[in-house]
Amino acid sequence: MSRRRLLGTAGAAGATGLALGAAAGAGTYAASRPEPAMALTALGSAAVPFYGAHQPGITTPLHARGHLIAFDLAPGAGRKEAAALLRRWSESARAMMAGEPASSGDTGIALDAGPSSLTVTFGFGRTFFDRTGLTGRRPAALDPLPAFSSDHLDPRRSEGDLWVQIGSDDALVAFHALRTLQKDAGAAARVRWQMNGFNRSPGATPHPMTSRNLMGQVDGTGNPKPSEPDFERRIFVPAAPPSGTPAWMAGGSYAVVRRIRMLLDDWEKLALAKQEQVIGRRKSDGAPLTGGTETTEPDLDRLGADGKPVIPANAHARISTPEANGGAAMLRRPFSFHDGIGADGAPDAGLLFICWQADPLKGFVPVQRKLDRGDALSAFIRHEASGLFAVPGGAGQGEYVGQRLLES
């Protein structure tokens, strides 16, 4: 079936999917779909708008497939070349997200596929402002993240001038976007690093549920919910940005990106009960060890028959809860990864951790500092790459992403 015919025959389903994306996309904070499994034609026809107050791919439900890619501007490239590049990228993203061929030299990889909920999100690293002569417009929140004792960071796979996040519910559609944007970079920018990720496919479970990571744990329960009155304030820069935040970041957010290797061989040697003690939640359903369901608030004061806390003092769920971190909150939207088997026979697998917040110094940093001091999970993970990116607000009709920075 051709893409045109697919989109035509699935129009009703696509409209439903689009409405859900607009009305409840942020509400699916736990990376689950709000409706039962869709037919393939409906799945392929679901589209996410490119234009809007915020860029897509932040509150959009988790995708089945994702690519993260960072670029450095080529030697000699500056503000003019960066503006032209963002203009090309934005037009290609707009077309592909609508299920149309890329505007320049489409490769045909995604022929016969619909948009498949494709999103493309663009961000700027700290060094971008040096290379474009825009240091005076660099947000204070882009100051380098502090060092953590659990870091084993590879600088070749960290940071970058420009960052792109691609997500889709179809692997070919996601790769098509990746290949298109790489070609669009031309002589203006070169790839610094690239990572591939995945999640459970929409409709793979009998009802919508929070995703699991490669440790088998339900992951995303504590995410801030759009129904909360302060959700926008915590995740997005307000229309009138605070001191130290330039006006071009209005409606934007900050993404912290971490490649976290999971030491699965060590983890899987633990008995189930010990794994649950490390996390502080039941593995079967994500409920806290103090009882209830996944969404039940953990009773951090409850003691067991032995007089010890039911949720151990160093349990991940206890240490990372906003209540233990002065209300610090971030919207986690990760992908799992598996990059093969190492020479020692251990899987190179884990989490492409991506979190969103209005200010990383109030979101990611205080929580990670607390985890760094005594999280039981730290013995089973290793932070191998890191990046911090300023993600501007969404483009208005006829604009390209970052235009308010590059042309103001």
Image: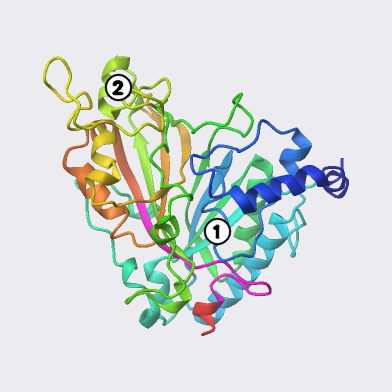
Q: What stretch is highlighted in magenta?
A: 386-403
- Residue hosting label 2: 275
Disc 1 + disc 2, Cβ < 8 Å:
no
Q: Position of residue 174 (x, y in %)?
A: 63, 47
- Residue hosting label 1: 121
Q: Position of residue 221 (x, y in %)?
A: 41, 36
Q: Position of residue 224 (x, y in %)?
A: 41, 47
Q: Which mark is residue 194?
A: none
In the displayed structure image, the side of residue 111 where residue 233 appears, left or right: left
**Hey, which quadrant is residue 90 in on the image?**
bottom right
Q: In which quarter of the image is the N terminus?
A: top right
Q: What element carries label 2?
A: helix
- In this view, the residue farthest toward the bottom is 408
184 relative to 286, above or below: below
- In this view, the residue farthest toward the left is 307
60 relative to 337, above or below: below
Q: Position of residue 137 (x, y in %)?
A: 39, 80
